[in-house]
């Protein structure tokens, strides 16, 4: 029996750079970025800042470094930051706020990743000798743990106003903010107007091989750049990958709508398979959260079963798996994956 072709739904991080990106990388003009001498990086940073409506930007190796250097740049040791309780910054960044910035994280329960502005207001500390100082509210849009749900613009605006009234900054973990913009049908600036700083990834749905952008005020970006160096993120002739980031921003944003359509196609198909369930309310961008309890099979076991059929995805809760659509998965791949899942479930 021939080996099955792999259909990889683990994450949009598995995307390969496009031929245009590879060509741009091959031809990139480079210099030493720590000295500010890499023209391709400089072009990417200028383009990125304009794209999200901020004064300046800096290219960092990863989204986690982007979020953590942003927290470092906005806070002092002993401060407190507010996050949604399932936020990537809180769940998946190795305790970075505590280790790197020496700040306390105050999580707030949201619904599908969306915090109630009244809860945010109540969580902001009043001046008191016993309290840490609240300095940053972090919003994640799209929200990974909820299954790629979008934070609505009116909610972001309300939280931004609550924070600013109290003298608190707003940082947007916008790893997939362009997915949010496509889902909302707005220019990304409509989202980023409601934050003081933003981190977004070039290496997920936008297909670049690596890298993220942090954007915000010039003085803030100067601090982020210094903390990037502190954390070992000072890069040299990095224009060879920044070139792919330029292609990502200019050519790969609008096509994210295809990933969203494929995610809906996948979710609707899964809901036809006995024992599996998707809450369609959560299928807003390129992620599909699949509940497996109806199979009497936990997520890791279902993940293992489907790996044997060449369909890859991650188990993120005891009875839930996450499937992510992206550039390298076509509508035909989705249909093939559904056929394999239905067969595996029926014959397990």
Image (cartoon, rainbow, N blue to C red):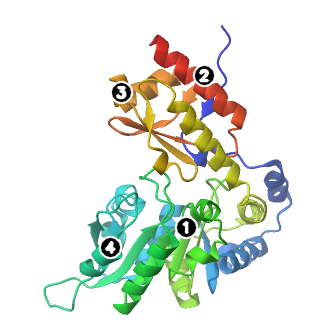
Q: Which mark is first along the chain, 4 or 1? A: 4
User: Which residue appears at 57% of the width and 32% of the height?
Assistant: 269
Vertical side of 286 occupied by 277: above or below: above
Please tell me whether mark 2 sits on a helix, a strand or a loop.
helix
C-alpha distance separating marks 3 and 1: 45 Å
The residue labelled by disc 4 is 82
How dense is the environment of label 4, judged by Cα within 10 Å: few (below 14), some, or many (20 and up)?
A: many
C-alpha distance separating marks 4 and 2: 43 Å
C-alpha distance separating marks 3 and 4: 36 Å
Please give the label number shown on residue 233.
1
Kindly indicate whether the residue at mark 4 contacts the one at mark 1 (C-beta within 8 angstroms): no
Vertical side of 167 occupied by 283: above or below: above
C-alpha distance separating marks 2 and 3: 19 Å
User: Which residue appears at 73% of the width and 54% of the height?
Assistant: 255
Please give the label number shown on residue 339.
2
Q: Quadrant of residue 73?
A: bottom left
Q: Position of residue 300 (x, y in %)?
A: 38, 30
Q: Which mark is first along the chain, 3 or 2? A: 3
Q: Nearer the viewer, mark 3 or mark 4?
A: 3
Q: Quadrant of the C terminus?
A: top left
C-alpha distance separating marks 1 and 4: 26 Å
User: Which residue appears at 40% of the width and 63% of the height?
Assistant: 89
Residue 112 shows in the view = yes
Q: Is residue 3 left or right of residue 38?
A: left
How dense is the environment of label 3, judged by Cα within 10 Å: few (below 14), some, or many (20 and up)?
A: few
Residue 9 shows in the view = no
User: Which residue appears at 14% of the width and 90% of the height?
Assistant: 129
The residue labelled by disc 3 is 294
Q: Nearer the viewer, mark 1 or mark 4?
A: 4
């Amino acid at each position: 029996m021939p080996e099955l072709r792999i259909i990889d739904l683990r994450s949009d991080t598995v995307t390969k750079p496009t031929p245009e990106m590879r060509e741009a990388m091959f031809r990139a003009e480079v210099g030493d970025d720590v000295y500010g001498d890499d023209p391709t990086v400089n072009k990417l940073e200028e383009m990125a800042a304009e794209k999200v409506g901020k004064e300046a930007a800096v290219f960092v190796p990863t989204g986690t470094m982007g979020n953590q250097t942003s927290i470092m740049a906005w806070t002092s040791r002993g401060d407190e930051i507010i996050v949604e309780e399932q936020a990537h910054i809180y769940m998946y960044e190795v305790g970075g706020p505590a280790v790197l910035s020496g700040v306390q994280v105050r999580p707030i329960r949201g619904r599908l990743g969306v915090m109630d502005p009244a809860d945010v207001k109540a969580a902001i500390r009043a001046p008191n000798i016993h309290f840490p100082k609240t300095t940053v509210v972090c919003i994640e849009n799209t929200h990974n743990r909820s299954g790629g749900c979008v934070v609505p613009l009116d909610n972001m605006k309300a939280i931004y106003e609550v924070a600013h009234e109290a003298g608190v900054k707003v940082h947007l973990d916008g790893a997939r903010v362009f997915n949010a913009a496509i889902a909302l049908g707005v220019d990304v600036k409509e989202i980023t107007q409601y934050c003081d700083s933003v981190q977004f990834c070039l290496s997920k749905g936008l297909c670049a091989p690596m890298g993220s952008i942090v954007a915000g005020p010039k003085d803030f970006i100067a601090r982020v750049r210094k903390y990037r160096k502190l954390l070992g993120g000072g890069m040299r002739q990095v224009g060879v990958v920044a070139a792919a980031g330029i292609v990502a921003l200019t050519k790969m944003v609008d096509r994210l709508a295809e990933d969203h359509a494929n995610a809906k196609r996948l979710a609707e198909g899964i809901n036809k398979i006995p024992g599996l369930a998707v809450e369609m309310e959560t299928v807003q961008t390129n992620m599909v959260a699949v509940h497996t309890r109806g199979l009497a099979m936990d997520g890791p076991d279902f993940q293992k079963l489907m790996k044997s059929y060449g369909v890859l995805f991650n188990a993120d809760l005891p009875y839930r798996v996450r499937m992510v659509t992206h550039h390298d998965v076509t509508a035909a791949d989705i249909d093939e994956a559904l056929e394999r899942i239905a067969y595996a479930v029926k014959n397990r």
